[in-house]
């Protein structure tokens, strides 16, 4: 009976977390107008609305440069410009395309390398509303020194306001929540890992020799 009760408590906590996750996503949109940052980063995905939103921010001078991370290797610069409807002069001068990322972890690594290479530490992050919590965790893990400003976009395919009504929406949001929990667990274990010992001073070395 105790084992059954423990399982029930775990399931109850997990379900409460899922509801809280869904509410967090729902409350995140529409996002407030962000303050200006050094750069904008957009994560590609199922919808091109992410990229369009990022380009509109760049055209409104919310940052000096934009990285679109995780671009399909078969897509050209002209293809991406056509998809986003970007103003040519702005696109030609200030948009970079990243082709190496194949998933959210790859996006985070690609973003961190790009931002560090250009000396950026304040980033506006653009992705789908349901994808934002996990994206922020991964980018923060890859680049803890950065200040991240969330700009979530309602893109579908999940209707987060009525996600329980359709099996497909419920499944996708649940999977996203589980991935989010997995990252929290991973980062929690990493934080418990062994810490580097401070280097001994010359005086300490003399005293112990």
Image (tube, helix red, strand yellow):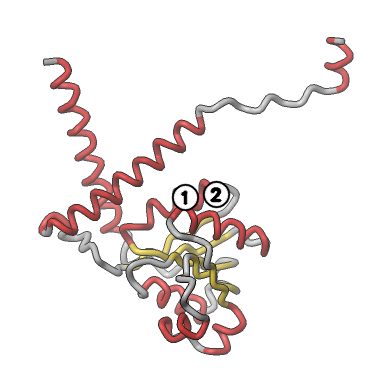
Looking at the figure, which quarter contains the N terminus? Answer: top left
Query: Tag 2, which secondary structure?
Result: helix
- Residue 30 position by quadrant: bottom left
On the image, the x and y values in percent for residue 182 come to 36, 40
On the image, the x and y values in percent for residue 40 come to 52, 68
Q: Is residue 194 above or below residue 207?
A: below
Left or right: residue 63 compared with residue 185: right
> How many numbered marks, from 0 up?
2
Spot the residue most to the top: 208
Q: Residues within 10 Å of mark 2 (few under 14, many from 20)?
A: some
The residue that label 1 is drawn on is 138
The residue that label 2 is drawn on is 142
- Marks 2 and 1, how far apart at CA: 6 Å
Q: Residue at x 50, y 55 (%)?
A: 108
Looking at the figure, which quarter contains the C terminus? Answer: top right
Who is closer to the viewer here, 10 or 22?
A: 10
Q: Residue at x 37, y 66 (%)?
A: 45
Q: Residue at x 49, y 55 (%)?
A: 106
Left or right: residue 5 compared with residue 96: left
Q: Residue at x 51, y 32 (%)?
A: 191
Please give the label number shown on residue 204.
none
Who is closer to the viewer here, 123 or 1?
A: 1
On the image, the x and y values in percent for residue 48 come to 37, 75
**CB-based contact (under 8 Å), mark 2 and mark 1:** yes
Q: Is residue 94 above or below residue 41?
A: below
Query: Tag 1, which secondary structure?
Result: helix
On the image, the x and y values in percent for residue 22 come to 24, 52
């Amino acid at each position: 009976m105790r084992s059954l009760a423990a399982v029930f408590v775990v399931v109850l906590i997990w379900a409460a977390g899922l509801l809280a996750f869904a509410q967090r996503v729902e409350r995140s949109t529409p996002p407030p107008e962000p303050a200006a940052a050094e750069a904008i980063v957009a994560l590609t995905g199922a919808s091109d609305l992410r990229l369009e939103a990022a380009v509109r921010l760049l055209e409104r001078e919310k940052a000096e440069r934009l990285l679109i991370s995780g671009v399909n290797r078969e897509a050209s610069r002209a293809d991406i410009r056509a998809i986003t409807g970007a103003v040519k002069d702005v696109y030609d001068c200030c948009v970079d395309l990243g082709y190496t990322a194949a998933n959210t972890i790859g996006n985070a690594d690609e973003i961190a390398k790009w931002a560090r290479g250009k000396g950026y530490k304040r980033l506006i992050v653009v992705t789908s509303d349901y994808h934002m919590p996990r994206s922020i965790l991964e980018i923060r893990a890859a680049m803890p020194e950065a200040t991240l400003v969330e700009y979530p976009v309602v893109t579908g395919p999940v209707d987060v306001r009525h996600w329980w009504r359709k099996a497909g929406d419920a499944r996708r949001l649940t999977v996203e929540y589980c991935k989010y929990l997995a990252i929290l667990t991973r980062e929690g274990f990493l934080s418990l890992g062994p810490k580097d010992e401070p280097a001994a001073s010359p005086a300490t070395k003399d005293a112990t020799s």
